[in-house]
Amino acid sequence: MAAKGEELAEKIREISVAEFFEKNRHLLGYENPTRSLLTVVKEAVENSTDAAEEAGILPEIKVEIQQLAEGRFKVMVEDNGPGIPSSKVPVAFAKFLVGSKFHRLRQSRGIQGIGIHGAVLYSQLTTGKPAKVLSSLGGNDPIHEFELMIDVTKNEPIVLSHRTLPNPKGWHGVRVELEVEGRYVDKITQSVPEYLRQTAIVNPFATLHFKGPNGASFTYRRRVEELPRQPKEIKPHPHGVELGLLRRMLSNTSAKTLLGFLTTEFCRVGRTSALEICSLASLNPGQHPQKLSGEEVLRLHKAMQSAKLMGPPTDCLSPLGEQMLLEGLKREFRAEKYVAVTRPPAVYRGNPFQIECGIAYGGELKEPVQILRFANRVPLLYHQGDCAFTQAIREVDWRRYGIPQDDFPKAPMVILLHFVSVWVPFTSEGKQALACYPEIMREAKLALQDAGRELSQYISRKERLREKQLRMGLFERYMPELAESLSKLTGRPKEEIMAQLERRLDEEKG
Amino acid sequence: MAAKGEELAEKIREISVAEFFEKNRHLLGYENPTRSLLTVVKEAVENSTDAAEEAGILPEIKVEIQQLAEGRFKVMVEDNGPGIPSSKVPVAFAKFLVGSKFHRLRQSRGIQGIGIHGAVLYSQLTTGKPAKVLSSLGGNDPIHEFELMIDVTKNEPIVLSHRTLPNPKGWHGVRVELEVEGRYVDKITQSVPEYLRQTAIVNPFATLHFKGPNGASFTYRRRVEELPRQPKEIKPHPHGVELGLLRRMLSNTSAKTLLGFLTTEFCRVGRTSALEICSLASLNPGQHPQKLSGEEVLRLHKAMQSAKLMGPPTDCLSPLGEQMLLEGLKREFRAEKYVAVTRPPAVYRGNPFQIECGIAYGGELKEPVQILRFANRVPLLYHQGDCAFTQAIREVDWRRYGIPQDDFPKAPMVILLHFVSVWVPFTSEGKQALACYPEIMREAKLALQDAGRELSQYISRKERLREKQLRMGLFERYMPELAESLSKLTGRPKEEIMAQLERRLDEEKG
Amino acid sequence: MKRKDEVIEALEALGAKILQEIERGENPSLEVPIRSLSNVRYNPETRMLELGSERAKRYFFNVAHVRKFVQTVEAAALSKELKEVGKHLSLREAFYRMKRTLPGSDINLVDEQEESNQAIEDLELITNLSREKLHFNANKMGSVAGKVVIEDKGDVVDWSKLGSGGWSIPSNVEEIVFKEVKARFVLYMEKAAEWERLHEDRVWERLNCVIMCSQGQATRGVRRLLQRLHLEHGLPIYVLTDFDPWGFYIYSVLKFGSIGLAHISEQLAIPGAKFLGLTADDVERYDLKKHFIKFEEVDLRRLEQIAKYEWFKDNKEWQRQFKLMKQMGAKVELAALSSKGITFISEHYLPEKLRKQEFLD
Amino acid sequence: MKRKDEVIEALEALGAKILQEIERGENPSLEVPIRSLSNVRYNPETRMLELGSERAKRYFFNVAHVRKFVQTVEAAALSKELKEVGKHLSLREAFYRMKRTLPGSDINLVDEQEESNQAIEDLELITNLSREKLHFNANKMGSVAGKVVIEDKGDVVDWSKLGSGGWSIPSNVEEIVFKEVKARFVLYMEKAAEWERLHEDRVWERLNCVIMCSQGQATRGVRRLLQRLHLEHGLPIYVLTDFDPWGFYIYSVLKFGSIGLAHISEQLAIPGAKFLGLTADDVERYDLKKHFIKFEEVDLRRLEQIAKYEWFKDNKEWQRQFKLMKQMGAKVELAALSSKGITFISEHYLPEKLRKQEFLD
């Protein structure tokens, strides 16, 4: 038996994360040709928008799709961002779990260091072609052109070629070209054009150009010449820190005292709060953080949860804002009423987040209700049924706001929901549905209810106005009939009765 | 601008895979307390069953759950497998993407080297407690007791303690003890008891013991004293290899000629087939595999797809078999008819797979139809709606088999579907739903149709029998009425007419 | 002539009252007794459903009232016109008579017949005159035969000399004059087929009576004709229905009136009517269980409602029938008696029940 | 007396034929003309819907046939009994007469009235005798008044001397004898309310005619009575209906027969009947557009079906009406003429159309 165990143990080996995702590419959104093509575009566009925005540049993104053969496309995405230094290009595109965004608590589009890498991997898997990446920092930096592949077994980049091209105009930015298998559609809700349309709604400061394989092309020009406030990085908030993470932070900290640890590693913890936490936990504030026993860590964790603290700072979040939301809706939908709500920030699992909701109602809109979901300005097109937002729309009692409901609300309207956070809890790597955390559900429902209330005021005002108009002239219209009938019954002339009724009506008015 | 690009690039860093999953634990099935507890049990049980089975031991698994406090449980799972050598224990449990199963094309339960690691991570994240692991290879090997945690930033094991205990009885196997947050339920379909019940249905050679936190305990004894045939490892089949993978195999092979490459790296490719492929691709069989141009690799790939080859060998798969399926269904459901179908193996993306289907019909069963899904002998309890199996059940035209249908078939029956493969394409890491690959859909539907046909024979046989019984005596019953009416019409005595009718009836019978 | 005056007087008084209010600068109003369930009560003394004293006031200068107000006054004007020319209108015709578009608008004075019907009913309530007296006719349906001679529109009609068809009962029987009433009672049945059975078997001759039918619920004309024979000539009214909650209900309406027409019970209800239809005892006696028609849910609910009616609540004999029917969970049709013989109902069932005086009250 | 013999003979012949087959050791059979749509055709010569020549053979020793076979023979035996005692049964009564439990089983010979109805209809087809002649009665419904005197069951009935009610038309008019027919034509209308309008206005007196109504689709008794007046006394039949696909359909059935009763067209259809109802031209002429009742989907479908009927297909005048109706997308009721005046229909509309001979054929 011992021999058997040894023998089997021989097979234990380490796996490359690239290899893992190669086998499980459906996890990244590459499950069928239509969706795969969309995912490639999406990952590149989000990388580009994030890069420009972070560098304080108003994004201008060009997307082009060429059809090379049946089921084979070339996707090109170019931005006007700051570019990537040539030394970093290979890892930024061809080594999984490398990225600039994972370790920071900061709102951005792509996050997990596997988005664009997945696109590169999908390309080489389906067409065997390397990714072509052009990058320049601008100014005197030439344009660097790379041909890259991923060494899947080692999760390392392979640089097939690297040449420099002249850059007379000082172009800066990144251009990615990928050859992929896929299927192009433009009519359905989960298409590339629809993705860009929705992206334009919540990124009014970006200009998007598109050229499609069927000759179609369009541009969404920016409506706003100002970037939204730059979101800031923040430290974790004590209320959301899990025990395991706390333990890890304690052992990694360079602080020498518990007091120092609490005030430097967390947001919203000043000296007073830190002392309160220590007192709640019956711990000495001067104790060395790495010397806490297991029992003491537990007490500390509990005390941190129950201490009264301010909510996390909001400058780490950059919501669109109600005005921007209204403008986005107005440009895309001809409705008769628009409402927008930006909720104050809240916290889930230590992460501050914020929910925005916009509704366009009536006018040229038709039933059934249309749902637009966004996370950090990125449209979510798939898995609507699994999403916390969809669930929230179902759970709100719309009848209260004068809107019939049958599972979903039944009205000619568009509901837009936007999740803004330093960390978006997707239910899968395909990044298409938000997980149903209670805090998220609660805030989403509050946002919908706020918007619903405003909408219901409009609906009932409209109703009242119509009533008054109806009332006007109603009596006048019936008066000749009454006069005629009374004349028949009494033999008195109709005109005489009319005159008296008119006198009476004036009194009614007065 | 150049400076900005450089500055931003400074933030590009590598991420540990453990850290990735810590933040995204919902991907691994830890999305709410109820499901989290089930996932912990599931990962441990599947590891244990695989280990015993692979070592040729009839599995005997003990599962115990103790409640420690509100929302806090201790989960213990013990097997009689071969054990793990003490040197390998830390990485086997506390380093992500380490495992014995990933690189092999071989049917097994757990696969991806993140299952039990996820449980250990979840435990330390929610309770801060280390995992306790006991292991022995049996014989003279003592019992090794470890306390393990994961260094999340480095994805490396931390061994808090390691002691050896005497092993007088020569016990071999592994015992894992984890403290976790969770919620225990036993009544719903997604509970630990239900998971074990379904596990017993498709693992008739295993004995499962369970002790629950509420004092409940039960045992499913093995019904079969023989392990299923050991599935063998196989090489990839040419029909399912993607271009990217082929390119990688070409550059990694030690073969010196294309002919050698094709015959040694793939299954079902002998000399004749290899030559046919080369000829189809217009390539020289003697060419060095690493010297193929991009264009040539494309041709080779195409030729491999179109060459006529035998299906992949079936000894890499170990289906339950129709007899075993019937027994599993019979023990759990009191029906009037049981049918079982094991389809011949098929291939998707180069992976052989096989679908089994069992149906229990009528008797004490009630509507609506109950669906049991399994993959490599593991029950799938969540995400039924997203699963290829569920989709296949919907797409089959059950009316053809005499079963009413309204989206799902409407009959008092249980449908069991079992996916057997060297690689299971789950739609997410939670491992609960199969992705809708066309080949899988097709085979699942064929399995259901085969079973449906057999069932419909039973249903129509039953129908015919009833008809014959109805027919018997039908004429006899109407004869007196006819005689009476005819007597009234003709004046002839009723008895006389009856006598003649009876004579005629005897002829009818004869 | 006197009756005509009564109606015209009432209509003119109504007009004058409204006109007066207008002249006084008041908001012209109508007071209408409320017809809802809450204002209907059973009067144990008269043994009829009657309207209570609740009244609603309806104003012209009120957005919610104006339409109904004008419709009601228009119905009054139309009624006066009909009286004056001596004509009648069906409810449908009256609807078209009242329907017209208000000048300068796309509003019709009435859009649906339901509206003109209600205006006419309100007029009945306000004037306490039946719609027949107001010259609006309801549906016509029903046949009669038997030992009665009437005069109507100048014709003398002998109900016993009309061949296989019988006299077709008009919707309005107010002006019929009974010349000769030899019949000793009236048999009323809910189905025309039953009536033809009894007529073919000349039951009215053999038993010296009148046989009358409508179809389903009796029309107002039939009810009023029954009532007049009962009140003016003292004929007992025997109601012959199936053993069925709906049959019982037909009997209940004939005898006590209905909620919808409670305001006019005095002119329609016949508290003295008796039930001669199939009973649970008949079902036993004539072995009719094999012809059970099983209850639907709706039958049971109807039965339970009827059993709770105030006028049946304390009636032991009826409660016994209800209870037995509930136990049987089934109903039986009169036609089922045909299984005992073609003329069984005429030659055995009816004579026997009449001889034994097996009525329910 | 001769007719009775004809019926009894046919029934006895049927019994004898079956008995003979049994004696010969054959599988006893019935040949029944098929009543389905595919076996009904329009005969342009007789201008009637008629049954084609397709026949189905039904056997006793056949699981699928035995039940219907015995039911049909039982219907024949029952008919013979009725003839012999000189009585009639309604379809409902006949159902109960036939309903009984087969000994030693829980099977009833008939379970639903639909079954006994079909057995009777099959018997009509086999013997080519109408159900009335077989002594089964259909529904009774309808009134008549006018210048005709009949004798029925020994009574002499003058249709012009029946007050406001008129004569109630029986379900079976086979044995009526016309004594004196002064009327020059018959006006048939679909609604009893319309009939009362014309009766109150004494149209039959002023125009010297007969007025007759049923309610909705005419009953068999009414159709047969119209046919007999037409055939035996040469009276033109004018059909007065709404401007409505359903009104057109009523006319079509009266004139050409219906698919369901194609086997009996000879005894029911009146190819000479003419349409005197509202036309698109009347709608224009009398300004009735404001009384449009908008088409429902079902109305349009009915209209399109009717327009495709073989007997209307090539009729230019009808096709014009159908087209105009389709353009209007609406129907108009006769009652809408009341908006022009209470007696407008009697005093203007009818006299004028008759004078101008504005019929549709």
Image (spheres, coloured by chain):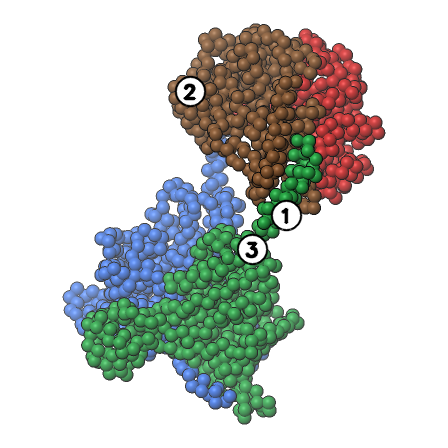
Chain colours: A green, B blue, C brown, D red
Looking at the picture, tell me which residue is in the foreground, C71 or A208: C71
Q: Amino acid at mark 3?
A: Lys
Which residue is located at x 61 percent, y 69 percent?
Answer: A70
Q: Amino acid at mark 1?
A: Gly
Looking at the picture, tell me which residue is in the foreground, A187 or A11: A187
Looking at the picture, tell me which residue is in the foreground, B507 or A305: A305
Question: Which residue was labeled with disc 1?
Answer: A473
Q: Which callout, 1 or 3, points to the residue nearer the camera?
A: 1
**Residue C318 numbered tag:** 2
Q: Can you see residue D47? A: no
Residue B322 to residue A441: above or below: above
- Percent across and percent down for residue D233 are 79, 17
Comes first in the chain, label 1 or label 3: 3
Question: Badge 1, how many Cα within 10 Å: few under 14, some, many 20+?
Answer: few
Which residue is located at x 23 percent, y 60 percent?
Answer: B69
Residue that extends furthest to the bottom in the rendered view of this protein: A140
The N terminus of chain A - image quarter: bottom left
Q: Residue A485 is drawn in which quadrant?
A: top right
